[in-house]
Amino acid sequence: MNEIEIVAGQGEWRGGFEERVLAGYRAAGCSEPLAQALLERAVKGIDDWTVATDGAGWIAVGVTEDNGATVGRIHELTVPQGREWAERWCVEQGAQRVEVRLMGGAGAFADYPVRGQIRMRAVAEQPELPPGLTVRRLTEEEYPGWYAGEEAAYIADIVRAGALTPEQAKAKSDEDFARYLPQGYLTPGHAFYAMEADGQVVGTGWVNHGFLPGVTFGFSLEVYEEHRGKGYGRAGMAVGEWATRQGGDEAMMFNVFGGNEVAMSLYDRVGFAVLDEYRSIDL
């Protein structure tokens, strides 16, 4: 292997990197507007990345602050055996952990634990609600109790994924809820649902219409513990498709945290493919 050296500018690498990212999203079935919007998210902060090459492939790395921790990120790795160089660079920058975003398989990072996945699927043109299940909007009076439960569940999911401590997870939760629901129940574009069966509320859902071009983002699908194991999880996915069309979108997207194999198995069965996968290790 040739010696890996940091390059002075991004010019030779950057165009190819952006096209590779776009090609990955197109291959996953994203529309061109959606692929372009996802590219914008993928290259956030790109001017501050460090790029290196061995003359045949590329390594792109960076560092950021995340909930009080210095985090290294490997943005691209096409150099065989280049992972060791990338991790060492992150250590030299003071990183306490290193993260990677993957498309199309784990590759050289198969031993990095999965911390989260973004899943997506085009929805049916006229999705139908499952028999015996009704859906209504959550009332404003129900919102505070729903919010408390969502916050606790979100923190637990983050901790279970193994990326953050409980204190860091609480800080992230506060930041994320403030960003996505600045007006609480009345935040534009967001809808909250209650699912009912046999006169009982069996679960809730929270979606954001127009999150990205043509996409409704499913922030939450919660089936209450006493009603689990009765098929409501799968039914809730149908509710998500129905809600997506109610908001005028064509595809549904959501995040699943690492460690939630039961949910991942369900999403595999109902056809929600992995669009992006996030893995990390502590250094």
Image (cartoon, helix red, strand yellow):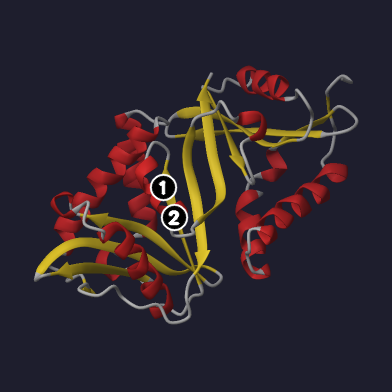
Q: Does the image show residue 140?
A: no
- The residue at the point 69 percent across, 24 percent down is 83
Q: Which residue is mark 2?
A: 269
Horizontal and vertical percent position of residue 245: 43, 78
Give the quadrant of residue 133. Answer: bottom left
Residues tagged 2 and 1 counted as in contact (Cβ below 8 A): yes
Secondary structure under badge 2?
A: helix
Quarter of the image for the C terminus: give it: top right
- The residue at the point 37 percent across, 41 percent down is 260
Q: Which residue is mark 1?
A: 265
Horizontal and vertical percent position of residue 223: 23, 55
Front residue of 177 and 208: 208
In 3D space, how far apart are the residues under numbered discs 2 and 1 (Cα atoms)?
6 Å
Q: Along the horizontal axis of the image, is 239 left or right of 230?
A: right
The amino acid pointed to by label 1 is Ser
- Can you say whether 103 is above or below 123 in the image? above
Horizontal and vertical percent position of residue 103: 63, 46
- Can you say whether 121 is above or below 42 in the image? below
- The residue at the point 69 percent across, 39 percent down is 48
